[in-house]
């Protein structure tokens, strides 16, 4: 018994009891669209890849994917939309949207212009520079994958509005094309369609009556002359909403986004000319300028797009996603130029009105299935399509006879007044499936992967030009064209006008079938050496039927079966360093238009384009090596070497004489391309803690190519010239300051591309070169209040001219002006 206020001691033995918890799984996903994510993807990739992320795009003035991707090492962009990688033309670069090929809206190129994709819709733009068997084999420069934005983890709504000023356009008197309606939405082609009475006449094998001629002229839109207007500010706006919600008992991620941009651009101080051989006593001594025109171009551009993506988990091991993307662009252009024509010995005033609208649509259903164990299946079904319409391009030429001191008068040839109508539609359907099996022990895991792809593509393209001839006295021909072609001379009994189809143009149909299968293995040797190898088999069959305006139809049907091997070794030198070595064979197929033997010209009095039905596909052997070092998060230092050997490369060849100027395409015998790439991205915090928020970045590519032109007619003046599109160097550089958390940042960006071959020429003319051009941009963003932030961008600050030369002759020259824009973003 225990006494009051007493105590007692007693030893008690306790058994050890274990408490067993259920398995606790902690998961985390990398923040998407960031620089850190891109560098982590680059470090873990089986091949050599580079990426531009949403974070980097937000810290730049880049408005579309074309502007963004030129920040990648070795990448250049031509005409603001066509991608060249490692100096190789757009034919050697393929573009995919969320992993699926996108058809081309270009009539002369089987390429996707990247300016069609607004930057507000992008999460990453990734360039894969080495081939692995699970990729399509028709590239040598790079495969560019545009990944649209994914849904955020939490509900989010973002609004943005930007206004911009161009020092050559905004508030100034600029050239403008008259509107027909809905140009601001990119649907201005409806009232510009080819008149039914003209289309019904076909190629005019049966001569129309005078009444029909008058009806045709009345049916054409009576718009020929450029207008002048005050330039308005550039404007862009976007809205997006996304999140992760419960629907019918299932979590569904979603994101929807709309973006719209309207811009005005002026190409001032514009020069266009041609070169012919200059000779003395029959011996060629250089080049001589002919047909020089000077003027200006005013352009209003619209780009808008939207996406609507959904994703959901099926049970716990499968994920289904539905991605929908649509973009549309339109350019409404007015051009005025004056110059001398050698053939007629007359001065000319030429006015051109040109409207082009393009669209891209893509719907993709995809699945990812973890089958348990180590098995996985991925598949996708994609339907996509593009359109390009150039309805009712008008060109009118007024001649000036200085010897007779006459006022400018409508020139009475087939190229005095011309209307051109172009239309292109392409659709593509593809299905792909990949199966992978992982095996081996932890730390030394291997992978076997097999898969296949089937794709069918169909294209219809048409381009027809009509000359409108007027048999009028001189006192009528000096009047503005809208008065000449009005209803006064199309009344019954009037016999003033005739309409004549021109030989430039026609139509073609193309269908393209691709079937591919592959097998590859990733095998871990030791702890730090990984082998990736296998082969891909591709069967392609292309049928192209060309229907020229005059003459018989031409049919070509190239088909190939190609085996494309690939082997690579990745060595993890340390936890932060990798060494990659790879070799592969890829190919490049002729583009549809390059096989079409139809003459077509881009501008009145300009050179003609003609395809070559005898073109062969190009085979390419590739070798790459790259050392990479990732010292800290967000930092990288890499050095890469590459070499490529081309068999039967396809070259753009210019044939120019006093009377005929034709650009066509030929297979050269062979070519070599090689170079070195350096990339650095480094915080300056190593020098001083005060500089830790500064990040310097740069990439430099130095390259060279040599081509054996033995198969191209008489050969080139430069027996060892570079390949078409090859620049000797590309330099990108910049500096970013970002506060802790990245809410405020300032970035300056620099880009320069060396002098490169624009088109090859046959003896005795030298090749055509695009000259070096320096570009400087900046971007500043900062918070204002809670979810409201501001952005200030400057673009093309140096306003370096775009210049193309041939020998001593300037073939093309213009300046586009500097742009400054300010914008607000609100995240409520």
Image: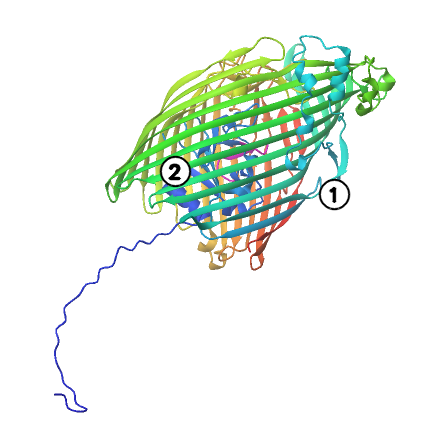
Whether tag 1 and tag 2 are in contact, CB under 8 A, the answer is no
Q: Residue furthest bottom?
A: 4
Which of 806/444 is in front?
A: 444
Q: Quadrant of the C terminus?
A: bottom right
Q: Which residue is rendered at x = 51% and y = 41% of the image?
A: 308
Which of 270/793 is in front?
A: 793
Percent position (x, y) of residue 509?
54, 18
SS class, disc 1: loop
Percent position (x, y) of residue 415?
72, 17
Q: Which residue is mark 2?
A: 367
Instruction: Of the two numbered discs 1 and 2 on the same chain, state the one appearing first in sequence.
Output: 1
Q: Quadrant of the N terminus?
A: bottom left
Percent position (x, y) of residue 306?
55, 40
- Range drawn in magenta: 71-82
Q: Is 128 on the left-hand or right-hand side of 471? A: left
Q: Is residue 80 magenta?
A: yes
SS class, disc 2: strand
In the picture, residue 174 is in which quadrant? top right
Q: Residue furthest front?
A: 248
Task: Examine the rendering and report whether any part of residue 142 can be seen.
Answer: no
Q: How many residues crowd mark 1 within 10 Å: few (<14), some (14–19), many (20+)? A: some
Q: Is 519 on the left-hand or right-hand side of 588? A: left
Q: Is residue 306 magenta?
A: no
Count of numbered labels shown in the rendering: 2
Percent position (x, y) of residue 258?
57, 43
Q: Which residue is mark 1?
A: 171
Task: Examine the rendering and report whether any part of residue 824 can be seen.
Answer: yes
Which of 782/810 is in front?
A: 782
Q: How many residues crowd mark 2 within 10 Å: few (<14), some (14–19), many (20+)? A: some
In front: mark 1 or mark 2? 2
* Up/down of 658 relative to 770, above or below: above
């Amino acid at each position: 018994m225990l006494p009051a206020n007493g105590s007692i001691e007693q030893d008690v033995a306790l058994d050890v009891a274990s408490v067993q918890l259920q398995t606790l799984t902690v998961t985390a996903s990398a923040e998407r669209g960031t620089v850190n994510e891109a560098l982590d993807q680059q470090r873990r990739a089986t091949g050599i890849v580079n990426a531009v992320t949403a974070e980097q795009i937000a810290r730049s003035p880049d408005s579309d994917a074309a502007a963004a991707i030129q920040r990648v090492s070795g990448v250049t962009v031509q005409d603001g939309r066509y991608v060249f990688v490692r100096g190789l033309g757009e034919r050697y670069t393929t573009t995919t949207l969320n992993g699926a090929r996108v058809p081309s809206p270009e009539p002369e190129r089987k390429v996707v212009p990247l300016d069609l994709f607004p930057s507000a819709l992008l999460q990453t733009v990734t360039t894969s520079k080495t081939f692995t068997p699970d990729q399509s084999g028709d590239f040598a420069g790079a495969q560019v994958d545009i990944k649209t934005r994914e849904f955020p983890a939490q509900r989010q709504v973002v609004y943005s509005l930007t206004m911009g000023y161009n020092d050559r356009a905004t508030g100034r008197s600029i050239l403008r094309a008259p509107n027909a309606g809905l140009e601001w939405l990119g649907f201005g082609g409806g009232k510009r369609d080819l008149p039914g009475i003209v289309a019904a006449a076909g190629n005019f094998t049966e001569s129309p009556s005078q009444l029909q001629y008058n009806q045709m002229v009345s049916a054409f839109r009576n718009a020929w002359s450029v207008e002048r207007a005050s330039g308005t500010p550039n404007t862009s706006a976007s809205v997006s909403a996304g999140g992760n919600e419960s629907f019918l008992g299932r979590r569904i991620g979603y994101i929807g986004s709309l973006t719209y941009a309207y811009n005005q651009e002026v190409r001032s101080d514009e020069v266009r000319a041609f070169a012919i051989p200059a000779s003395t006593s029959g011996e060629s001594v250089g080049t001589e300028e002919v047909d020089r025109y000077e003027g200006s171009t005013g352009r209003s551009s619209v780009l808008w797009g939207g996406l609507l993506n959904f994703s959901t988990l099926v049970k716990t091991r499968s994920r289904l996603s539905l991605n929908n993307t649509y973009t549309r662009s339109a350019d409404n252009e007015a051009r005025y130029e004056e110059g001398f024509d050698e053939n007629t010995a007359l001065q000319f005033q030429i006015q051109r009105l040109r409207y082009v609208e393009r669209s891209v649509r893509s719907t993709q259903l995809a699945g990812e299935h973890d089958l348990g164990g180590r098995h996985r299946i991925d598949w996708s079904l994609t339907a996509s399509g593009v359109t390009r319409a150039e309805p009712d391009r008008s060109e009118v030429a007024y001649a000036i006879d200085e010897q007779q001191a006459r006022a400018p008068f409508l020139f009475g040839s087939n190229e005095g007044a011309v209307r051109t109508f172009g239309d292109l539609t392409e659709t593509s359907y593809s299905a792909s499936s990949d199966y992978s099996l992982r095996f081996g022990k932890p730390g030394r895991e291997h992978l076997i992967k097999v898969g296949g792809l089937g794709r069918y593509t169909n294209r219809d393209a048409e381009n027809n030009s009509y000359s409108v001839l007027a048999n009028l006295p001189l006192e009528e021909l000096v009047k503005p064209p809208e008065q000449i072609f009005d209803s006064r001379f199309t009344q019954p009994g009037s016999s003033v006008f005739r309409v004549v189809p021109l030989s430039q143009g026609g139509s073609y149909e193309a269908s393209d079938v691709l079937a591919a299968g592959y097998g590859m293995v990733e095998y871990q040797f030791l702890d730090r050496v990984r082998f990736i190898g296998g082969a891909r088999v591709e069967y392609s069959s292309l049928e192209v039927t060309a229907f020229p305006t005059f003459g018989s139809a031409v049919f070509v049907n190239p088909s190939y079966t190609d085996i494309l091997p690939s082997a690579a070794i990745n060595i993890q030198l340390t936890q932060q360093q990798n060494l990659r070595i790879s070799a592969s064979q890829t190919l490049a197929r002729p583009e549809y238009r390059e096989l079409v033997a139809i003459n077509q010209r881009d501008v009145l009095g300009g050179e003609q384009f003609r395809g070559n039905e005898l073109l062969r596909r190009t085979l390419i052997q590739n070798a790459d090596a790259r050392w990479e070092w990732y010292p800290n998060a967000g930092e990288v230092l890499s050095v890469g070497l590459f070499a490529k050997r081309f068999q039967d490369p396809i070259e753009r060849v210019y044939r120019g004489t006093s009377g005929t100027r034709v650009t066509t395409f030929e297979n050269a015998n062979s070519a070599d391309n090689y170079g070195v790439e350096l990339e650095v991205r480094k915080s300056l915090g190593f020098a001083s803690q005060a500089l830790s928020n500064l990040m310097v970045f740069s990439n430099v590519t130095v390259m060279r190519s040599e081509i054996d032109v033995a198969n191209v007619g008489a050969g080139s003046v430069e027996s060892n010239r570079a390949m078409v599109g090859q620049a000797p160097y590309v330099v990108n550089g910049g500096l970013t300051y970002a506060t802790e958390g990245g809410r405020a940042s300032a970035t300056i960006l620099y880009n320069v591309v060396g002098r490169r071959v624009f088109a090859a020429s046959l003896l005795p003319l030298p090749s055509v070169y695009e000259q070096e051009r320096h570009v400087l941009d900046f971007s500043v963003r900062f918070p204002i209040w809670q979810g409201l932030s501001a952005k200030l961008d400057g673009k093309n600050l140096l306003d370096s001219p775009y210049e193309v030369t041939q020998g001593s002759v300037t073939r093309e020259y213009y300046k586009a002006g500097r742009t400054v824009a300010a914008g607000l973003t609100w995240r409520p």
